[in-house]
Image (cartoon, grey):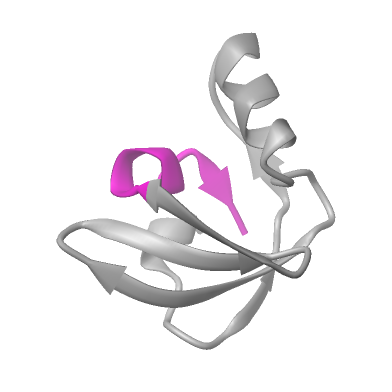
Amino acid sequence: MPLALAKTGDLQTIQKINGNDEIKAFLESLGFVVGANITVVSEIHGNMIVNIKGSRVAISKAMANRILV
């Protein structure tokens, strides 16, 4: 299921990241790697704030659709 469909507050584990090498490298630099635990903190105006590896990160809904949990 894409991260964009995850419920706020539920702990999820990243299973796969879709996209080209540049997108994957960008997400990896933010801590989005396969096996990492992630929680959706809130959703504002189509963007998501997620908690990953102890940090809060804002990503677009389009980027969240590339992350499968």
Q: Residue furthest front?
A: 55
Q: Quadrant of the C terminus?
A: bottom right
Q: Quadrant of residue 44?
A: bottom left
- Residue 1: percent from left, percent from top: 51, 59
Q: Residue furthest right?
A: 35
Is 45 situated left or right of 35 in this image?
left
Q: Is residue 68 magenta-colored?
A: yes
Q: Is residue 53 above or below residue 67?
A: below
Q: Residue furthest bottom?
A: 9
Residue span colored magenta: 60-69
Of residue 17 and residue 39, the one placed in the foreground of this image is 39
Q: Is residue 12 above or below residue 17?
A: below
Is 27 situated left or right of 43 in this image?
right
Of residue 21 and residue 31, the one placed in the foreground of this image is 31
Q: Is residue 29 above or below residue 22?
A: below
Is 44 situated left or right of 33 in this image?
left
Q: Quadrant of residue 12?
A: bottom right
- Residue 54: percent from left, percent from top: 75, 70
Is 40 situated left or right of 45 in this image?
right
Q: Residue at x 28, y 56 (%)?
A: 47
Tally the marks. 0
Q: Residue at x 67, y 41 (%)?
A: 30
Q: Residue furthest top?
A: 21
Q: Residue at x 30, y 70 (%)?
A: 43
Q: Is residue 57 above or below residue 23?
A: below
Q: Residue at x 32, y 39 (%)?
A: 62
- Residue 13: percent from left, percent from top: 73, 65
